[in-house]
Amino acid sequence: MEELDDNAQQRRETFARYGLAMYHAQCVEKSLAILVSSVFNKEFLPSNPNRREEIQDEVFSKTIGRLLTRMRKQIAVPTKLDRTLDDAWQKRNWLAHEYFWARAGEIMTTRGRDKMIRELTELSDLFSKVDAHLVSIYEKWNKRAGVPQTVIEQNLRKLIQDNE
């Protein structure tokens, strides 16, 4: 493996941080999909397994904006959470659609890339915290709904095995 100079290493770090921030943004999106499809969907639990899968397939194809709209129709979202989710949505869209254009000058300099690395780390942390909050909501629901931990662990093992 060839050694990278400082600029190349910093560029690599910048893009790695962008990837991590987008990963955490997608985690928020999928956690919202889980909430919308099951936790806040009165139809979910009484449905048979095939219908549950159809519900999830339909919801998991939606973007954050559409998921938020649907969630707001399903429940009264607490104001603080609603603002946080709206902020995450706006930042996710900016990150996905505008980030590198908005940072075209910064990416050309060491100081600019340092700024981008800090900014991307902050975005990643924000998305990670929002996702952790959403996960805590559906984990509580799983317990109340009687979803055995073994089922969750089995699905996780299958996910990992399918990708080995």
Image (cartoon, rainbow, N blue to C red):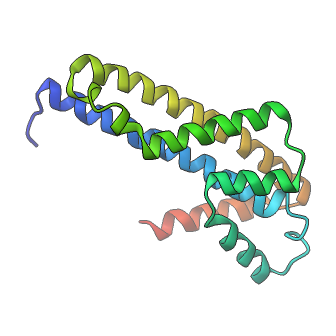
Residue 20 sits in quarter:
top left
On the image, the x and y values in percent for residue 26 come to: 55, 50
Q: How many marks?
A: 0
Location of the C terminus (image quadrant)? bottom left
Q: Nearer the viewer, residue 76 or 142?
A: 76
In the displayed structure image, the side of residue 163 where residue 116 appears, left or right = left
Residue 5 vs 15, above or below: the answer is: above
- Give the residue at the far left of this rendering: 2
In the displayed structure image, the side of residue 134 where residue 10 appears, left or right = left
Q: Residue at x 84, y 81 (%)?
A: 48
On the image, the x and y values in percent for residue 69 come to: 75, 53
Residue 69 vs 132, above or below: the answer is: below
Q: Nearer the viewer, residue 50 or 81?
A: 81
Residue 72 vs 9, above or below: the answer is: below
Q: Residue at x 47, y 39 (%)?
A: 21
On the image, the x and y values in percent for residue 150 come to: 73, 62
In the displayed structure image, the side of residue 77 where residue 28 appears, left or right = left
Q: Residue at x 88, y 69 (%)?
A: 45
Q: Residue at x 15, y 24 (%)?
A: 6
Location of the N terminus (image quadrant)? top left
Q: Nearer the viewer, residue 46 or 113?
A: 113
Residue 61 vs 135, above or below: the answer is: below
On the image, the x and y values in percent for residue 149 come to: 76, 57
